[in-house]
Amino acid sequence: MNFPSNTEWRKSAKGNYWRKYKDEMLVVGGSAEKGYWIRVGENFLPDSEESLEKAKKVAEDKVDL
């Protein structure tokens, strides 16, 4: 599938959240109990976040660096 260079956050069929941001694919998954993991492109970030909103922000900030 070919998406525009920027999309809003969407929920996948697997229950993960994703968006395309500045031509980079971002994916966030997990739960409040276990923490939310973050993937930017093909790379998973080493730390997890306690909230979904924080995980989304961290993913976007990583692209902005």
Image (cartoon, rainbow, N blue to C red):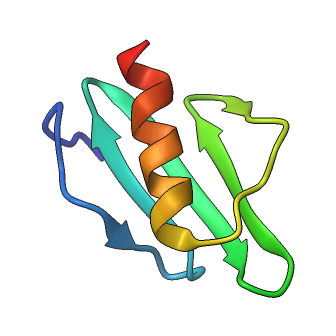
User: Does residue 33 appear left or right of residue 37 in this picture?
Assistant: right
> Where is residue 58 shown, x and y percent of the image?
52, 42
Residue 64 found in image quarter: top left
The residue sitting at 60% across, 72% down in the picture is 51
Q: Between 12 and 57, which is closer to the camera in this rendering?
A: 57
Which residue sits at x=13%, y=38%? Answer: 4
Horizontal arrangement in the rendering, residue 58 relative to residue 3 (left or right): right
Please identify the quadrant where the C terminus is shown.
top left
Q: Find the residue positioned furthest to the bottom.
A: 33
> Is residue 50 left or right of 52 when viewed as pictured?
right
Residue 46 in the image: x percent, y percent?
A: 84, 36
Q: Is residue 40 left or right of residue 50?
A: left
Task: Give the residue at the far top of this rendering.
Answer: 65
**Which residue occupies the foreground of this view, 15 or 1?**
15
Above or below, 62 against 11 in this view is above
| Viewer-nearest residue: 13 or 45 | 45
Q: Place residue 50 in its image quadrant.
A: bottom right
Number of numbered discs on residues: 0
Q: Measured along the vertical axis of the image, is residue 38 above or below residue 63?
A: below
Give the image location of residue 9, x and y in percent.
30, 63
The percent coordinates of residue 28 (x first, y second) are 58, 59
- Residue plotted at (18% across, 50% down): 7
